[in-house]
Amino acid sequence: MPRRWTVILRDHADAARPIRPEDCHGLLNHWWPQPASEHTAPKRWAMNGWPRPLGDRLHHWTLTWLDDAEPAPLDPGELVGAAQRIGDHVLEPLSVTRTFDRTYTEMLTPPSAPAAVRAAEVRTRTPVVTTTRDTSGERVPHIWPSPRRLFGAVHRSGGEIVGGSGALGAVARFAPPALAAPWLEQALAGLARVRRSALPGQEVRLCEHHHAENRTVLGWRGGLLLEAFGGGNRDAAAFAALLELLELAGVGKYTAQGFGSVRVDTVTRGRSAAAVPAPRSGRAPHRVRRTPPRAVEARAHAAAEAEEFGGTLFD
């Protein structure tokens, strides 16, 4: 079943280079190896960013195991007190907390009560790498991606689902096939009704990340608002599950190396996304004004128009 762990580590190295994505990737390949025949296939795990310094030689790290049928070969909890080498660092796990533990069947089965989630604020925690190939075969970075690209892809062969990437791909690859196929059809249809818009103060921007072998990876960072319009209770439940999977599986390429980690904050139906205030600095109290119905309709219309934009850096 999909599982997520939060790990607190102590660094025993007195002086070391910054932790690199390839160092973390090497460690997890040692923890959770794949057969040689699957070496180039997508990983069963997602590294949600890299170890983040907390001060006093402590680091915070979040990891997700995505497979529903096969448990992780090694539970990080078994390594408490055993030092692990990550590049030039020697990190000792002090505590391991399981923060997610649900089967795909539980996640994809619609709840009996009406789903309340209709919108979500998505903020990046690391660079997100989303690319497509142009007519010459060159990879073109995409920022401000469409919801379809945010949630990944499903790969088919002969009409059958054979794999995928991202949140959708996690279901395609690891959920029970009898449940995954109809759920994916509904989820993909529902994504056509999901609109994106900007989050004030969280503008999406292009960024660079220095990767292995002196390569520079182009990605994007920032935040955006996703809103689902129309559809019934099953569509709303599928949207809520997609948001959950989005945070677990990450976005774009190289999620097994820590890229594409996002934080998803859901907004319920009773609190319209149009009325959610932008983040403000300081502790001064502020009031949220109720948005008139016409303003909500205008916002939905504007979001729909933004989805149809076809500029150079857009889909």
Image: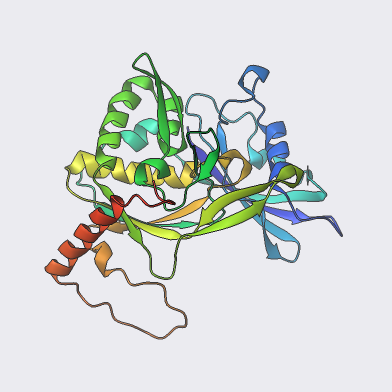
Residue 240 visible here: yes
**In the displayed structure image, the side of residue 53 where residue 249 appears, left or right:** left
**In the displayed structure image, the side of residue 305 where residue 34 appears, left or right:** right
Viewer-nearest residue: 175 or 259: 259
Which quadrant of the figure has residue 109?
top left
**In the rendering, at what x and y percent does residue 159 appear?**
33, 16
In the image, what residue occupies the spot 19% across and 58% down? Answer: 301
In the image, what residue occupies the spot 39% across and 45% down? Answer: 315
**In the displayed structure image, the side of residue 113 where residue 254 appears, left or right:** right
**In the rendering, at what x and y percent does residue 78 appear?**
68, 38
Q: What colour scheme does the image use? A: rainbow
Looking at the image, which residue sits at the far front? Answer: 136
**In the rendering, at what x and y percent does residue 269 appear?**
22, 57
Name above or below for residue 47 compared with residue 144: above
Which quadrant of the figure has residue 18?
bottom right
Looking at the image, which residue sits at the far right? Answer: 14
